[in-house]
Amino acid sequence: RKDKGGGTPGSDINIYKHGIQITLAGAYPDLQAYVTELERAPQKLLWGAMALSVKSYPKSELTLTVYTLSLDRRWLVV
């Protein structure tokens, strides 16, 4: 909704949530280290879903859904 002059200042600002699903395969300690690095990243992420399955010990598969928030409608421009 656009502010027509009588609303709250800044009420015409939209926040966009951009998501991506990542699937990784490896040993559990390696997958845990990857998630730890994501949590330490300077860009803050919102967690959507996380699923871990063991394909063939010791190989596991981790599927993550993470989101960022932005004031820009476009997320990736190619």
Image (cartoon, grey):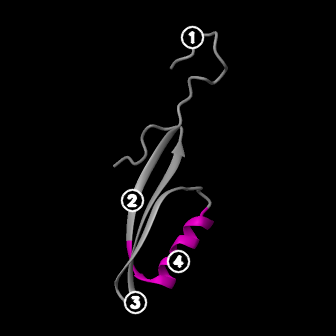
Mark 3 Cα-neighbour bin, 10 Å: few <14, some 14–19, many ≥20: few
**Numbered mark located on residue 58 in the image:** 3
Mark 1 Cα-neighbour bin, 10 Å: few <14, some 14–19, many ≥20: few
Q: Secondary structure at mark 4?
A: helix
Mark 4 Cα-neighbour bin, 10 Å: few <14, some 14–19, many ≥20: few
Q: Secondary structure at mark 3?
A: loop
Q: Nearer the viewer, mark 4 or mark 1?
A: 4
Q: Nearer the viewer, mark 2 or mark 3?
A: 3
Alpha carbon distance from label 1 to label 3? 60 Å
The residue closer to the viewer here, 31 or 50, is: 50
Alpha carbon distance from label 1 to label 2? 38 Å
Q: What is the residue that sits farthest to the bottom in this orientation?
A: 58
Question: Which residue in the protein does label 4 denote?
Answer: 32
Q: Are marks 1 and 2 in contact (CB under 8 Å)?
A: no
Alpha carbon distance from label 2 to label 3? 23 Å
Give yes or no for residue 50 being in the magenta stretch. Answer: no
**Numbered mark located on residue 21 in the image:** 2
Q: Are marks 4 and 1 in contact (CB under 8 Å)?
A: no
Mark sitting earlier along the chain (4/3): 4
Alpha carbon distance from label 4 to label 3? 13 Å
Q: Secondary structure at mark 2?
A: strand
Q: Nearer the viewer, mark 1 or mark 2?
A: 2
Mark sitting earlier along the chain (4/2): 2
**Picture residue at 62% right of the left edge, 60% below the top:** 42
Mark 4 belongs to which amino acid? Gln
**Numbered mark located on residue 4 in the image:** 1
Q: Quadrant of residue 62?
A: bottom left
Task: Please give the range of residues in magenta.
Answer: 24-41
Q: Is residue 51 left or right of residue 9?
A: left
Q: Tell me where residue 3 appears, x and y as whole percent.
A: 57, 16
The residue closer to the viewer here, 75 or 6, is: 6
Mark 3 belongs to which amino acid? Pro
